[in-house]
Image (cartoon, grey):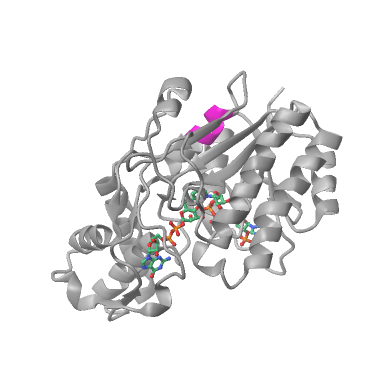
Amino acid sequence: MAKTALITGILGQDGPYLSKLLLAKGYKVYGMIRRYSNPNFETLDYLEITDKIEFIEGDMGDESSLMNVVRTVRPDEVYNLAAQSFVGDSWQMAKLTTEVNALGVLYLLNSLKIFSPTTKFYQASTSEMFGLGNTHGYQDEKTSFHPRSPYGIAKVYAHWMTVNFRESYGLFTASGILFNHESPVRGKQFVTRKITDGAARIKYGLAKKINLGNLDAKRDWGFAGDYAEAMYLMLQQDKADDYVIGTGQNHSVKEFVELAFKYAEIPDWKKYIVIDPRFKRPAEVYELKAKPEKALKILGWRPKVTFAELVKMMVKADMKRVKTLLV
Ligand code: NAP
Ligand code: F7E
């Protein structure tokens, strides 16, 4: 019989890449979505898989809805990708971010414990949990957490709750500590997509500038498709564990801008970038760089798409899309 997977947050960036991978492996994929008057399937449509998913309504802020989803589906695997995932907004929406990203995970774990205790569970943890924490300039599974945003703090709670359900009740609960990963379906608020979308608009005369915050921040950026593979591999192990997933290299926002403008063939990027204090954060995470040795050794996972290939892929996709807006 086909394996079943339930993905929360399926309409975001990672959900579609993970769904595509699981569908190719023969899984039946259930996608949990919130109640919408008008759901937006754009990211699933981009990968041409919308009609292959069975949707079920549930909300991370509503425990009874999660109990209902788990009791109805009783999947082999749950991938919890749902979150208020934009760090920048988490100061303004600290309560909502905590309810969805922290308490929502507790509700989901409780639902599994009660209705489907043999289900394997993946929690979307994040390098934001490290914040200022580092070990000689990189972060791995042993690095201490020093989160800098309500988003990071809520994710630390969810991470430890995931570990605790493993240790307390013997549930198979894995936590993937993923560093930034991007793609052509990345939300346009995030800096990479903001830059590639902006560069494409400038190229075709639909915009004149891009307003950005801290150009010196450094991130370890990888491709979302590669990271979906890591999520899957974590749930195929005999033992649940936590893994850092990243490329091991980092680049500044400024480097990302330079390369994006190069691929968009726009000379002199400095003419188009406006430093805007509205996009600076009350507390910044200056630099993140993964040391993904454990994942390499135990999961056999390694990233395939390089930083330059990622920027090129995103610029190309946005140029193609923006061009269609002109006619
Ligand atoms: P994303 O594009 O923001 O997608 C998040 C999804 O969560 C959206 O589809 C959203 O639904 C859904 N969601 C939000 N609140 C919800 C609620 N109350 N109930 C049910 N669903 C809700 O995020 P992503 O980039 O795919 O990331 C996936 C997960 O990995 C997130 O948990 C994120 O925090 C984590 N993560 C991401 C990265 C990264 O670099 N991308 C790195 C580390 C960890 P709507 O479509 O209705 O808004
Ligand atoms: O910011 C700087 C900003 O919003 C990256 C989420 O997926 O990855 C993501 O969080 C950096 C920061 O991603 C702008 O200050 C400068 O230093 O693209 P971002 P993030 O905050 O790293 C982690 C791993 C997650 O878990 C999150 O869910 O870029 N930056 N200027 C800017 N950032 C934005 N958004 N907009 C700017 O104008």
Towards the viewer: 238 or 287 = 287
Please say if 35 is above or below 2: below
Quadrant for ligand 1 reads bottom right
Residue at 31% over, 79% down: 207
Q: Find residue 172 and report its horizontal and vertical position in percent.
A: 69, 28
Towards the viewer: 134 or 88 = 134
Q: Which quarter of the figure has residue 140? A: top left
Residue at 22% over, 58% down: 259
Single out the residue that lies furthest toward the left: 267
Side of 203 relative to 283 (left or right): left
Q: Name the main secondary structure of what is drawn in magenta.
A: helix
Q: Find residue 110 and report its horizontal and vertical position in percent.
A: 80, 41
Q: Which quarter of the figure has residue 112? A: top right
Q: Which residues are magenta?
A: 229-234
Please say if 326 is above or below 59: below
Q: Quadrant of the N terminus?
A: top right
Towards the viewer: 301 or 20 = 301
Q: Find residue 132 and report its horizontal and vertical position in percent.
A: 43, 52
User: How many marks do you count on the picture?
Assistant: 0
Whether 79 is among the magenta residues is no
Side of 19 relative to 210 (left or right): right
Q: Which quarter of the figure has residue 320? A: bottom left
Residue at 41% over, 52% down: 183
- Please indicate, yes or no, whether residue 78 appears anywhere in the rendered image: no
Towards the viewer: 296 or 208 = 296
Q: Find residue 122 and report its horizontal and vertical position in percent.
A: 62, 37
Q: Quadrant of the C terminus?
A: bottom left
Residue at 58% over, 21% down: 237
- Please indicate, yes or no, whether residue 195 appears anywhere in the rendered image: yes
